[in-house]
Image: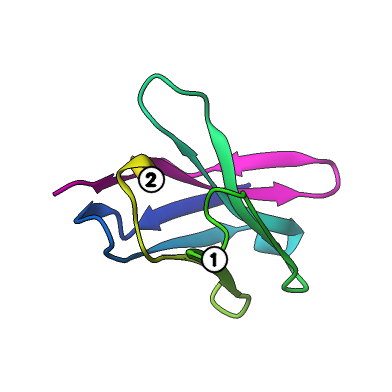
């Protein structure tokens, strides 16, 4: 089992920045990929960014150049640095961790990010 705890959400003005953190505990040795998804009101949950244990990253087109995902393997923590935030970035952001064998995805409880003036 893996437990994920997110932090760092909040209210920010357009153009501002926030950094989300996700701390993993439990059977963290089994985690292959960690990432962030988000879900805006009335919309489906969508992937934002992922990072594997080797540090390779991938981003949704909507956040490329503005968001940066990073991972501290020693602390079992993944971060999402969000810059140049837009109102359309408003959503609940969920951390996830993927166990490779057998494949299973763990989810955090979510943290609200609101971009508004």
Spot the residue most to the top. Answer: 42
What span is colored magenta in the figure? 91-117
Neighbour class for label 2 at 10 Å: few (<14), some, many (≥20)?
A: many
On whether residue 101 falls in the magenta region, the answer is yes
Closer to the N terminus: mark 1 or mark 2?
Answer: 1
Q: Quadrant of residue 39?
A: top left
Does residue 29 appear left or right of residue 17 in this picture?
right
Q: Is residue 25 above or below residue 108?
A: below
On whether residue 4 falls in the magenta region, the answer is no
The image shows residue 89 at horizontal and vertical percentages of 38, 45
| SS at mark 1 in the image | loop
Q: Which residue is mark 1?
A: 65
Which one is in front in this view, the residue at disc 1 or the one at disc 2?
1
Q: Residue at x 54, y 60 (%)?
A: 25
Does residue 30 appear left or right of residue 83 in this picture?
right
The image shows residue 56 at horizontal and vertical percentages of 75, 69
| SS at mark 2 in the image | helix
Considering the whole magenta stretch, tell me its main secondary structure: strand
Q: Residue at x 86, y 47 (%)?
A: 101
Q: Residue at x 71, y 48 (%)?
A: 98
Q: Which residue is mark 2?
A: 89
Spot the residue most to the right. Answer: 101
Numbered mark located on residue 51 in the image? none
- Seen from the viewer's position, the closer of residues 2 and 72 is 72
The image shows residue 52 at horizontal and vertical percentages of 73, 63
Does residue 29 appear left or right of residue 3 in this picture?
right
């Amino acid at each position: 089992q893996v437990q994920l705890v997110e932090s760092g959400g909040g209210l920010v003005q357009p153009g501002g920045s926030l950094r989300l953190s996700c701390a993993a505990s439990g059977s963290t040795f089994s985690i292959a990929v960690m990432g962030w998804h988000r879900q805006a009101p009335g919309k489906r949950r969508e992937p934002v960014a992922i990072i594997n244990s080797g540090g390779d990253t991938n981003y949704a087109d909507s956040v490329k150049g503005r968001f940066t995902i990073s991972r501290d393997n020693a602390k079992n923590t993944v971060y999402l640095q969000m810059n140049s935030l837009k109102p359309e970035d408003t959503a609940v952001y969920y951390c996830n961790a993927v166990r490779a064998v057998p494949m299973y995805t763990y989810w955090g409880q979510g943290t609200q990010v609101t971009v508004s003036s």
